[in-house]
Image (cartoon, rainbow, N blue to C red):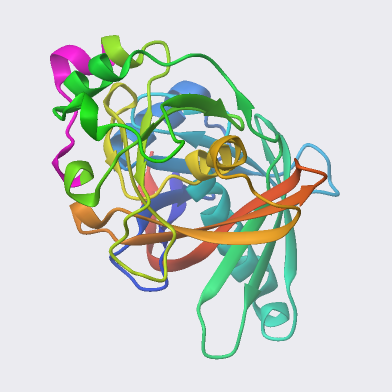
Amino acid sequence: MRRKYYLLDVFTDRPLAGNPLAAVVDCDGLDSAAMQRIAAEFNLSETIFLFEPRDPVNTALLRIFTAKAELAFAGHPTVGAAVLLGELRGHELLRTQDVRVVLEENIGSIVCVVRQRPGKGKQAHFTLPKLPVQAGVPRSSDRLAAALGITAAEIGFERHVPTIYSAGTAFTFIPIASLAALARAQPRAALFDAALAPIEAAFLYTRETIDPQHDFHARMFAPSLGIAEDPATGSAAAAFAGVLMAFEGVPDGSHALTIEQGYEIDRPSRIVLSLEVERGTLFEASVGGNAVIVGEGFLDV
């Protein structure tokens, strides 16, 4: 059967940057095993499959696969799917107004808003389906440092220490003291999985940035999921809201910050994380960014 697909670059406003995404839109008859094989064929960070929604008031049912496993939730597939659906189903509307897209993911229904301002690319943001929660206790800084090829002294800055948070997908968050140390970090195959288990993904971040207008610089490694290094990780940015609440003393009100990622692998990306804080508690958060459609084609499977 011939199946239409699109290729997008997400968390960027220009082609051949950001995080690439394959989106299959003709999915009738595909079971989980077939979708996993197709995702392995694309061999990108994630491949998505769009189905008719279970609830007709929603826009689409979305399933997300890495090259090795299905995910309940991920950020760049959510942003990419919203922008693609906004373009395919609401192209004319986007010229004059924002378009609401509701995606049914394994974690639950996610509300997205797609917009295009004059002279700017398409962008989308989604409200977190679950607020971040602490999801475990990480290994010692010595073990984490050894697994990343850096020193224990280079882990941590200000009040920040390693933590584990999840907003649907769990990450070990490892603060790194400098941009130079973060650039040197690289998973050591023999040590990484043991040091991170049972959390398979590590999100490293530092306050030093390449672009002075950005707030944090990050890298994400998840080799056991088939992701040697992710250009941009929206689900980690979602969980990072919990890290900020734990260590930054975020005051009441509305806040937005930009996380830069992917620079070390020549895929510069920008993720916008917004927080709504009331009485010292995170009330709502959203993740957003640009996405561009860079190609389309057909699979004969």
Residue 164: horizontal and vertical position, in percent?
A: 49, 24
Image position of 278 (left or right of 5): right
State which quadrant residue 34 falls in.
Answer: top left
Residue at x 33% of width, y 14% of height = 140
- Res 26 seen here: no
Residue sitting farthest toward the front: 158
State which quadrant residue 167 falls in.
Answer: top right
Residue at x 78% of width, y 36% of height = 54
Residue 48: horizontal and vertical position, in percent?
A: 49, 43
State which quadrant residue 297 falls in.
Answer: bottom left
Up/down of 200 relative to 277, above or below: above
Residue sitting farthest toward the bottom: 119
Quadrant including the N terminus: top left
Residue 59: horizontal and vertical position, in percent?
A: 74, 52
Q: Is residue 36 magenta?
A: no
Look at the image and give the residue range highlighted in magenta: 183-193
Quadrant including the C terminus: top left
Residue at x 42% of width, y 29% of height = 161
